[in-house]
Amino acid sequence: MREINVRSITEKVRELCMEANTDLGNDVLQAFDRAMEKEESPLAVEILKELKENARIAKEEKVPICQDTGFTVVFMELGQEVHLVGGDLTEAVFEGVRQGYRDGYLRKSVCHPFTRANTGDNTPAIIHTEIAPGDKVKITIAPKGGGSENMSRVTMLTPSDGVEGIKKFVIQRVKESGSNPCPPTIVGIGIGGTLEQAALLAKKSLLRPLGSKNPDPELEKLESEILTEINKLGIGPQGLGGRTTSLAVHILMMPCHIASFPLAVNIQCHAQRHKEAVL
Amino acid sequence: MTEPIRLKTPISDRDVEKLKAGDRVLINGIIYTGRDAAHKRLTDLLKEGKDLPFDIKGQIIYYVGPTPAKPGQVFGSAGPTTSYRMDAYSPLLMERGLKGMIGKGMRSNAVKEAMKKYKAVYFAATGGAGALLAKRVKKAEVVAYEDLGPEAVRRLEVEDLPVIVVNDIYGNDLYLEGTKKYRKE
């Protein structure tokens, strides 16, 4: 067994919270460039330029890309040959979030659902843990903004709805969301599993780099068909009209119950922030 | 693209009359911040017949909850928040003289009607461009509700804050028109 002290997890989570919020991935910047080439609306091109300039300033000055520095979503792959020592793992992650949001001057955006009283330190974080082979711990920090999360939905389709049912629901969701989720968006889709698993698949699908292909050719085709339809809607960057409503559609799928057809749509704004590290 | 229009606050009915949906505007001067909780408190004061903590006549409210400023920084990252949550409060503020709102996302019909009636405009700032927008803020101070943290009302002095007119006083709506223009059947 390899021993890892949870203090090193706190330290890594702290760093990743700050890095994710200030350094937009190159895959996203390249997706902006590709969108600009295809964009027909001059105003939309101006907005895409503004987003690139914003990302440049954020990275250079180490300031948040967006003021909504999100609810901190943490994906952890725990190697089964790792023995964690030095304290409580969940608390170690929360402490990393506390320190990262304090030291990075990030906005604390977590509150009590009824009173709306802010928890003050952006905790609790949402932690999704998986056991994996090996003796490493992989941590991914994906801050999620409220505006785009509010436009996301889970539904239980009827098996007879088929692939057409998926397309119809997703396109309708993007259409109704309009300008609210800060387009150009990335549309994460989870198909199958159970209610909560579909939502988790949708969220996980957002971690795939933009511009990469879905390894499943059937899903790759479906992603491309849905993206084409979405970009015919005309919503455009910031909803002010244009070709670039979404930069990508990502799908993750797994088997479901013989009676069910779960579908989740997790909409992600253009500030598609996530950073990972392996301990 | 035509050059943006420079607008100096406070703004008058004449300024508002000149603005059309789709115009790019650079705002200069004083604006105020306010979002969900501040709007509730401001409109509660008006309903109780009390004065607001600042003179709202001719002013612009920016729907924003910034990140904390870093040492040496005037203002933290400051992109707009989604505006529909302020829809319930905006008509009363326009009745009392509010001339402009900056946010993102579509407004309700009641808000659009109030804009025509009281001569006010709705601007969109680029959602998510928080780092860029923060650099246009030259001074910032809390004027009310410090207890609300990022939601406190702040007086900002801005220089060339880039926004786009979405709703004008003539009933135009760039969200509807822009989408219609680029929609493919």
Image (cartoon, coloured by chain):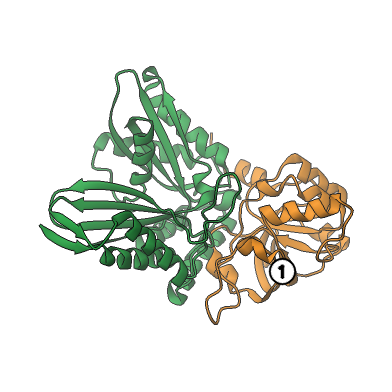
Give the colour in which the image draws chain A: green
Q: Residue furthest left?
A: A1
Q: Quadrant of residue A197?
A: top left
- Picture coordinates of residue B145, whole percent (x, y): 71, 63
Q: Is residue B10 visible?
A: yes
Q: Quadrant of the N terminus of chain A?
A: bottom left
Task: Give percent across and percent down for residue B3.
Answer: 67, 67
Q: Quadrant of residue A93?
A: bottom left
**In the rendering, what colour is chain B?**
orange
Residue B32 x, y percent position in the rendering: 73, 65
Mark 1 belongs to which subunit? B
- Residue beneath the point at 68% across and 54% down: B37
Q: Report the number of numbered marks.
A: 1
Q: Is residue A161 left or right of residue A180?
A: left
Residue shown at 75% from the left, 47% from the top? B172
Q: Quadrant of the C terminus of chain A?
A: bottom left
Residue B4 versus residue B38: which sits nearer the camera?
Answer: B38
- Find the residue positioned furthest to the front: A87
Residue drawn at (66%, 43%), measured in percent from left and top?
B176
Does dot 1 land on a helix, a strand or a loop?
Answer: strand
Compared with residue B34, is residue A228 higher up or lower down, i.e. above or below?
above
Which residue is labeled 1 in the image?
Answer: B27
Q: Amino acid at mark 1?
A: Ile
Q: Is residue B15 above or below residue A172?
A: below
Q: Residue furthest bottom?
A: B72
